[in-house]
Amino acid sequence: MQQLTLKVNKLQQLTSGIKSFEFVSPIGDDLPVFTAGAHLDFHLDNGLIRSYSLANNPEESNRYVTAVLREEMGGGGSKYMHDNVSVGDELQVTGPSNNFELVDISSTHILLGGGIGITPLLAMGHKLKAENRPCHLHYCTKSREETAFVEEVEEIFGDNLTFYHDGGDPSKGINLKETIGVQTKDANLYICGPAGLLSAARDVTSHWTVGSVHFELFQSTKTKEEKAA
């Protein structure tokens, strides 16, 4: 796996808890190619290793864009990214890697994102739009104000987009049985979001064709020392 040094070029507070990070090469080189759904593993100075999905257009060779949700009760990786990473800093990463690839033979792509889970789906949207391939994004958040990349999402997906704002109460949000309970012909489903959304969506789609439901779940919580052991 490639080891890279990336420089922070831009930071943006997207919502009250989500910040985006734009990275470039410290010497102005093109960055390694990535595919929609890919992620980078960040080796942080506090010893943690965290995986963050890439959100920008895979056709861009000059930058990587990701976003991080600050988790107060997490293991410390997101708080480090929010509190300690500044423009001009250089970070060590490995990747890009992809365990969440688009299926090329699918005739229809259904994307289901919850909160910060929009990041890999946004990159997928760029690719699907460029290739004029049928798709629809179902995007679940608390409110429009708490919706990351909202304007970019609207520009990319246009009419092929449905927002679900639940005000913090999942019972008032998306009805998964109505939305993805029936598999249309040749459809593939891509899910990224909180564990509760992933679990519920997988239960609802348990009858879908084998291999047609794809999801991203990161469990990279090891420290550098544990990785080396």
Image (spheres, helix red, strand yellow):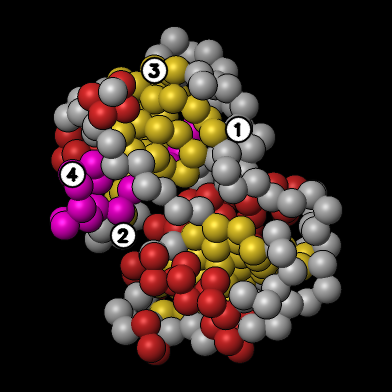
What quarter of the picture does the C terminus occupy?
top left
Q: Residues within 10 Å of mark 4 (few under 14, many from 20)?
A: some
Please state if 182 lies on the left or on the right of 203 as rendered: right
Q: Residues within 10 Å of mark 1 (few under 14, many from 20)?
A: many
Looking at the image, is mark 1 or mark 3 earlier in the sequence? 3
Please state the extent of the stretch shown in magenta in the rendering.
63-79
Disc 4 designates what residue? 76
Helix, strand or loop at mark 1:
loop
Disc 1 designates what residue? 34
What is the three-letter code of the residue carrying label 1? Phe
What is the three-letter code of the residue carrying label 3? Thr
Residue lying furthest top: 27
Disc 3 designates what residue? 5
Disc 2 designates what residue? 15
Which quadrant of the figure has residue 38? top right
Residue 135, percent across and down? 72, 65
